[in-house]
């Protein structure tokens, strides 16, 4: 099995009680079956308390019943009662793993950390984007991926990473090129040789970019209106969205590039499961535009303020399945022109 990881993956350490925005607040904490069975055997007052906090949600999952908007196990110190009393092995899988994510593709496993955690966000925004690789003796995971489509996506993502770093263009121009590339690759996913060959030729990119005509009538309001349809997880977020005016590029181009690389790493290969590559790349494009608009509206001055804004954006989008579904229902071919125009005119 090949294991690929963001280089910061191994260095991530949760700061628990020192966290400025703990993940034990705002989210539903789902309890997996194994952990639920363990909680059912816990003796004494602690066991009774934990069991009294379990509820079943609308989807039939067992969860912690929130108390004052937070997990009932969250102590005033910012620590987790279960972790403090019983250690990490007492945590539900979701608590134990967050903010780490794992994607399995048969003989390849990819791991990373999520932008929605402030500590992980700081690493993603300020450390160079690097991937590490190693192999172990584990057998491949069972999967029903189409090998041709998957290998086309793997090669395609390599090309996408090169475009994301191409210093001849602004990051917004690179993103516009990537939207075009995603459209062509999605159309030929099971016979992609010619598309991959064309896009491997970096000499052709300036000409391709010149042919991408932006519309003078690009309307950023359409994108903010979409975000306003999403279900907010925090009170502060809708107010922030109302202040957005212009999707300007992030002042630090290197940071904007790292954001783009994060989204490519996390989402591009997910198209192996549904073939919908364009929507995945549009998620990256829309995220760059929204993050740029958030910075333009809020003028963050410090690293803490930058991390606060970007992790909030990610938390509201990437860690809400309903909100991601809102985006994916909206995304698609009809949105290409709008996204491309906003990127090229901003
Ligand atoms: S958000 Fe990140 S740093 Fe904060 S408590 Fe959760 S995992 Fe730890």
Image (tube, rainbow, N blue to C red):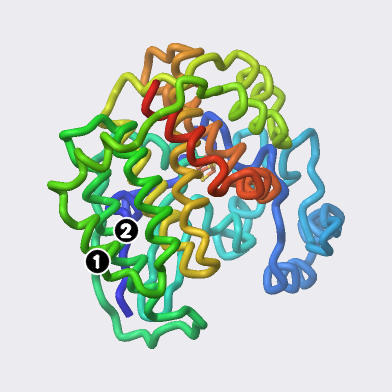
Residue that numbered label 1 is attached to:
133
Q: Please tell me which residue lies in front, 211 or 277.
A: 211
In space, the residues marked 1 and 2 are separated at their CA atoms by 16 Å
Q: Is residue 182 above or below residue 344?
A: below
Dot 1 beta carbon under 8 Å from ligand 1: no
Label 1's element?
strand
Tell me if residue 11 can be seen.
yes
Q: Please tell me which residue lies in front, 58 or 11.
A: 58
Earlier residue among tags 1 and 2: 1
x, y percent for residue 159:
25, 56
x, y percent for residue 305:
45, 20
> Would residue 319 be found to the left or right of residue 217 on screen?
right
Mark 1 nearby-residue class (10 Å; few <14, some 14–19, many ≥20): few
Q: Which residue is depicted at the point 32% across and 54% down?
A: 6
Residue located farthest toward the left when viewing the structure as drawn? 203
Q: Please tell me which residue lies in front, 223 or 47.
A: 223
Pick the quarter of the image with the N terminus.
bottom left
> Would residue 262 be found to the left or right of residue 254 on screen?
right
Q: Which residue is depicted at the point 41% across and 42% down?
A: 120
Residue that numbered label 2 is attached to:
157
């Amino acid at each position: 099995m090949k294991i690929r990881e963001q280089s910061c993956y191994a260095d991530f350490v949760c700061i628990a009680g020192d966290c400025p925005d703990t993940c034990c607040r705002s989210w539903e904490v789902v309890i997996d079956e194994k952990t639920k069975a363990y909680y059912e055997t816990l003796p004494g007052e602690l066991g009774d308390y934990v069991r009294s906090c379990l509820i079943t949600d609308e989807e039939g999952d067992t969860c912690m019943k929130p108390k004052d908007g937070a997990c009932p196990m969250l102590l005033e110190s910012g620590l987790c009662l279960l972790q403090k009393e019983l250690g990490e092995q007492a945590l539900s899988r979701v608590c134990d793993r967050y903010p780490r994510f794992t994607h399995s593709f048969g003989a390849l496993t990819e791991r990373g950390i999520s932008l929605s955690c402030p500590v992980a966000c700081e690493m993603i925004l300020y450390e160079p984007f690097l991937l590490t690789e190693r192999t172990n003796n584990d057998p491949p995971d069972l999967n029903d991926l189409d090998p041709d489509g998957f290998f086309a996506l793997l090669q395609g993502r390599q090309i996408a990473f090169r475009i994301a770093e191409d210093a001849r263009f602004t990051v917004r121009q690179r993103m516009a090129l990537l939207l075009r590339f995603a459209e062509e690759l999605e159309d030929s996913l099971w016979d992609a040789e010619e598309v991959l060959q064309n896009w491997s030729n970096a000499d052709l990119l300036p000409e391709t970019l010149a042919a991408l005509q932006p519309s003078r009538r690009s309307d950023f309001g359409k994108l903010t209106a979409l975000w306003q349809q999403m279900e907010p997880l925090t009170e502060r977020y809708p107010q922030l969205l109302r202040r957005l005016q212009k999707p300007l590029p992030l002042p630090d181009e290197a940071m904007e590039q790292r954001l783009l690389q994060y989204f490519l790493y996390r989402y591009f290969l997910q198209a192996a499961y549904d073939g919908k590559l364009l929507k995945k790349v549009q998620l990256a494009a829309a995220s760059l535009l929204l993050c740029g608009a958030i910075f333009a509206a809020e003028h963050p001055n410090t690293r803490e303020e930058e991390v606060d804004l970007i992790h909030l954006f990610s938390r509201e989008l990437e860690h809400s399945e309903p909100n991601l579904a809102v985006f994916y229902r909206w995304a698609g071919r009809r949105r290409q022109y709008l996204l491309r125009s906003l990127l090229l005119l901003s």
